[in-house]
Image (tube, rainbow, N blue to C red):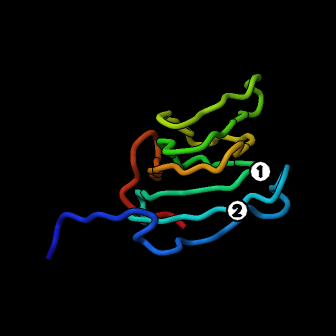
C-alpha cells in the first residue's frame, strides 16, 4: 500500500459542488467546489468559491485554518469593525464561534484544515 499520495484539483475530478443556503446569501450567487482529502474529526482539502457574499456562523467546536492559494476574499467579523482582506499566501484562522460575512472578491481557492475542539483541545471523537 502506498503511503505517499498526491492530488491536484484538476486530477481529482470535478469536485463536490455546493452553495450557501439561500437565507445565508448576502450578495451575488456564490458557488463552492470542494476537493476533500481527509474527512473526520480533522478535515483537509481544497475549497473554491465564485464571487459573492454569505453569512458564516461557526459552531463553538470547530476551528478552521486555511491558506489562500489564489483569489481575494474579505472577512468581516460581527462586532469587530473594519473588514479584512486576504489573498494568495495569507494564512487565516477562524476560531470556534466565529460569526460574520465572507465576501469572495475574485474566484478563490484555499487549502483548508478543520478540527473539532473541546475545552481548547482537539477532540478525539467525531460529534454529530
Q: Residue furthest top?
A: 81
Q: Quadrant of residue 9?
A: bottom left
Label 1 Cα neighbours within 10 Å, binned few <14 / some 14-19 / many ≥20:
some
**Badge 1 vs badge 2, beta-carbon distance below 8 Å:** yes
Judged from the image, the secondary structure of the residue bearing numbered disc 1 is strand
- In the rendered image, residue 110, in percent from the top left (x then y), is placed at 51, 49
Q: Residue at x 16, y 72 (%)?
A: 2
Using the image, determine if residue 56 lies above or below residue 9: above
Q: CA distance from mark 1 to mark 2?
A: 8 Å
Q: Residue at x 77, y 28 (%)?
A: 79
Using the image, determine if residue 110 lies above or below residue 94: below
Q: Is residue 103 visible?
A: yes
First along the sequence among labels 1 and 2: 2
Q: Is residue 38 left or right of residue 3?
A: right
Q: Quadrant of residue 73?
A: top right
- In the rendered image, residue 80, in percent from the top left (x then y), is placed at 73, 25
The label shown at residue 31 is 2
Tell me the quadrant of the picture where the C terminus can be found.
bottom right
Tell me the quadrant of the picture where the N terminus can be found.
bottom left
- In the rendered image, residue 5, in percent from the top left (x then y), is placed at 25, 65
Tag 1 residue: 52
Q: Quadrant of residue 22?
A: bottom right
Q: Residue at x 83, y 54 (%)?
A: 28
Amino acid at each position: 500500500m502506498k503511503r505517499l499520495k498526491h492530488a491536484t484539483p484538476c486530477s481529482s475530478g470535478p469536485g463536490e459542488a455546493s452553495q450557501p443556503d439561500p437565507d445565508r446569501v448576502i450578495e451575488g450567487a456564490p458557488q463552492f467546489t470542494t476537493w476533500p482529502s481527509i474527512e473526520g474529526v480533522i478535515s483537509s482539502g481544497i475549497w473554491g468559491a465564485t464571487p459573492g457574499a454569505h453569512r458564516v456562523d461557526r459552531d463553538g467546536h470547530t476551528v478552521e485554518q486555511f491558506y489562500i492559494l489564489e483569489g481575494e476574499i474579505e472577512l468581516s467579523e460581527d462586532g469587530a469593525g473594519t473588514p479584512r482582506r486576504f489573498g494568495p499566501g495569507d494564512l487565516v484562522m477562524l476560531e470556534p464561534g466565529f460569526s460574520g460575512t465572507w465576501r469572495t472578491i475574485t474566484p478563490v481557492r484555499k487549502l483548508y484544515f478543520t478540527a473539532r475542539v473541546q475545552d481548547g483541545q482537539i477532540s478525539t471523537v467525531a460529534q454529530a
